[in-house]
Image (cartoon, rainbow, N blue to C red):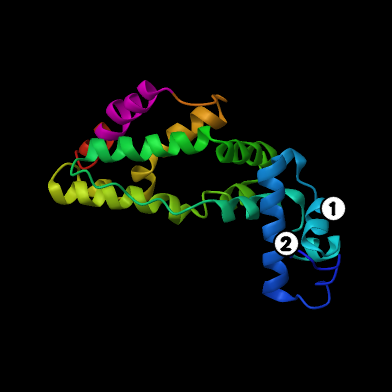
């Protein structure tokens, strides 16, 4: 806080209050310098605490960076255009804008740093795997009710196949932004045929 003596809050803040201060400091560092500029020393100094207080809560820089990124993300509200194809394209286009943004660049840095650390990759899935799947399951459920998709398609892995393919464009292929024709191809050539034919023998 402005006007406080350096370190003045160290003896007063504990538990959730201290954790919140550290996370807020990590968010500020992440947005200012990206993951490459994030250090435990800088976060501790900005939070007015010591490195041990940070390490007690997050074992390393990557875990702290991912926790800070989750503070920056928002819940996606599923579109409701009345038509499955339009809903899927709207969700994909929103995701593409996010992954192409400065915040998306931070996410790509974090994923690159995580490498094969699957437990950490789970932590950074835009809050959680359930949160990622939720809007896709909602729009797919509506489409099934309208008769646009097979009931058997209502499965998280099926529902999220489009967003997984888009992520591959960024994470595997390293594109800065996916062209709209790629999004249309994902929807028309993969997603819609899959959900419509899911119940066929």
Q: Is residue 133 visible?
A: yes
User: Which is more toward the observer, 56 or 77?
Assistant: 77
Residue 194 picture location, percent across and down:
28, 35
Q: Please state the total of marks drawn on the protein image.
A: 2
Q: Farthest residue in the left direction?
A: 147
The answer to the question of whether label 2 and label 1 lie on touching residues, with beta carbons closer than 8 A, is no
Residue shown at the point (69%, 72%) measured from the top left: 17
Q: Which residues are magenta?
A: 179-192
Residue 196 picture location, percent across and down:
21, 37
- Decide if residue 175 is on the left or right side of residue 59: left
Residue 180 picture location, percent across and down:
37, 24
Q: Tell which circle, 2 or 1, labels the residue nearer the N-terminal end.
A: 2
- Decide if residue 151 is on the left or right side of residue 181: left
**Height in image: 29 above or below 45?**
above
Q: Where does the C terminus fall, quadrant-wise?
A: top left
| Residue carrying label 1 | 41
User: Which is more toward the observer, 175 or 100?
Assistant: 100
Task: Indicate whether residue 184 is drawn in magenta.
Answer: yes
Question: Would you say the magenta stretch is mainly helix, strand or loop?
Answer: helix
- Decide if residue 53 is on the left or right side of residue 19: right
Residue shown at the point (43%, 33%) measured from the top left: 165
Distance from Cα at disc 2 to Cα at disc 1: 11 Å
Q: Where does the N terminus fall, quadrant-wise?
A: bottom right
| Quadrant of the image occupied by residue 95 | top left
Tag 2's secondary structure? helix
């Amino acid at each position: 806080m402005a006007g406080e003596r350096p370190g003045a809050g160290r003896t007063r803040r504990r538990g959730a209050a201290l954790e919140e201060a550290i996370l807020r400091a990590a968010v500020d560092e992440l947005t200012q310098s990206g993951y490459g500029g994030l250090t435990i020393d800088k976060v501790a100094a900005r939070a007015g605490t010591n490195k041990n207080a940070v390490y007690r809560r997050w074992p390393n820089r990557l875990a702290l960076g991912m926790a800070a990124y989750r503070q920056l993300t928002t819940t996606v509200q599923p579109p409701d255009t009345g038509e499955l194809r339009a809903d899927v394209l709207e969700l994909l286009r929103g995701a593409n804008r996010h992954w192409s943004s400065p915040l998306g660049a931070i996410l790509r840095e974090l994923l690159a740093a995580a490498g094969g650390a699957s437990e950490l990759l789970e932590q950074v899935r835009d809050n959680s795997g359930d949160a990622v799947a939720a809007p896709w399951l909602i729009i797919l459920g509506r489409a099934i009710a309208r008769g646009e998709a097979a009931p058997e398609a209502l499965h998280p892995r099926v529902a999220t196949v489009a967003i997984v393919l888009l992520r591959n464009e960024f994470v595997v292929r390293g594109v800065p932004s996916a062209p709209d024709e790629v999004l249309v191809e994902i929807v028309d050539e993969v997603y819609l045929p899959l959900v419509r034919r899911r119940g066929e023998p």
